[in-house]
């Protein structure tokens, strides 16, 4: 299946039953219970009791696996972002060169992300390569924003992203957010519409100059930036659901790399939207 992620193509934990991970087959949906996509997996647990359906083995995915892989992936993003911030100057004489490198890095990161998205199994080298090039892009963009907009805007965007993550995680654990098929469909439809509008705006700005349709600046830019943050928060809830289902249903440990991949992309999405909103608010 296609997953809950801004690139719309990361594969989820359930690949065989044609539904969102944890929602199962049509018969189980009608019965109101979740089918186990890993029912034949010797590492699977019974979701009603949490007890293993078969003797547990060492290579079933755990929350610790997800945390460690996500930390490594996000750490790679942060490390390369800091390196690019320090080594790629954004002064008037060099900013075009640095922007060029950032755009190339973003395109390479996108290619790596798409390659991973169409693979049946996670490839850690591809995921870390994506994180490294994404970090280069973020480092240049963040450095330029800090230099020309406000020195504190990057820290504020990072703190804002952390707050969104913590808030959604808390709401999800408290079951204030319930991920259902309807929720999934609504978020995916809204996200595709959002991305389509951004692409149209980009095309207008490339061929018509300025900010295109005005979705990236001014009051309209703030509104669309807030919508982008809300969508990112919804993607976090979908990612948390996938992680929960993967652990509950005994997904293989390698699937934790997919969780790290998805969470990293979602956090990058939220950070960029947060940075955009703060830049518009602080810009003249």
Image (cartoon, grey):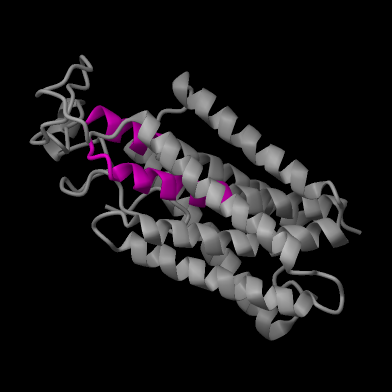
Whether residue 8 appears in this view of the structure is: no
Judge whether 49 appears above or below 210 on screen: above
Does residue 259 show up magenta in the picture? yes
- Between 84 and 92, the residue placed more toward the observer is 84
- Between 3 and 151, the residue placed more toward the observer is 151
Q: Dividing the picture into quarters, in which one does residue 85 lie?
A: bottom right
Side of 9 relative to 142 (left or right): left
Q: Position of residue 263 (x, y in %)?
A: 47, 44
Side of 100 relative to 73 (left or right): right
Q: Does the magenta stretch mainly form a helix, a strand or a loop?
A: helix
Side of 152 relative to 25 (left or right): right
Q: Position of residue 81 (x, y in %)?
A: 65, 57
Q: Position of residue 214 (x, y in %)?
A: 73, 66
| Residues drawn in magenta | 240-268
Residue at image x 76%, y 79%? 96
- Between 26 and 239, the residue placed more toward the observer is 239
Q: Position of residue 208 (x, y in %)?
A: 71, 83
Whether residue 192 appears in this view of the structure is: yes
Residue at image x 76%, y 49%? 154
């Amino acid at each position: 299946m296609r997953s809950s992620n801004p690139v719309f193509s990361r594969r989820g934990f359930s690949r065989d039953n044609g539904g969102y991970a944890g929602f199962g087959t049509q018969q189980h949906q009608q019965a109101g219970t979740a089918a186990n996509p890993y029912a034949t997996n010797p590492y699977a647990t019974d979701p009603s009791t949490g007890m293993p359906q078969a003797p547990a083995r060492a290579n079933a995915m755990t929350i610790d696996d997800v945390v460690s892989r996500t930390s490594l992936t996000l750490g790679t993003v942060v490390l390369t972002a800091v390196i690019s911030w320090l080594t790629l100057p954004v002064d008037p004489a060099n900013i075009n060169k640095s922007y060029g490198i950032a755009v190339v890095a973003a395109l390479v990161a996108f290619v790596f992300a798409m390659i991973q998205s169409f693979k049946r199994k996670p490839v850690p080298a591809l995921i870390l390569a994506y994180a490294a090039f994404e970090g280069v892009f973020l480092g240049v963009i963040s450095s330029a924003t800090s230099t020309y907009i406000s020195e504190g805007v990057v820290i504020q965007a990072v703190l804002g992203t952390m707050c969104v993550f913590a808030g959604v995680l808390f709401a999800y654990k408290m079951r204030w957010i319930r991920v259902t098929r309807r929720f999934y469909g609504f978020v995916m439809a809204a996200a595709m519409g959002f991305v389509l509008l951004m692409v149209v705006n980009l095309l207008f700005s490339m061929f018509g100059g300025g900010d295109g349709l005005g979705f990236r600046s001014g009051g309209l830019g703030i509104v669309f930036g807030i919508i982008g943050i809300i969508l990112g928060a919804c993607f976090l809830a979908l990612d948390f659901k996938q992680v929960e289902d993967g652990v509950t249903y005994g997904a293989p440990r390698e699937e934790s790399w997919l969780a790290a991949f998805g969470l990293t992309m979602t956090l990058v999405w939220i950070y960029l939207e947060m940075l955009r909103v703060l830049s518009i608010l602080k810009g003249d």
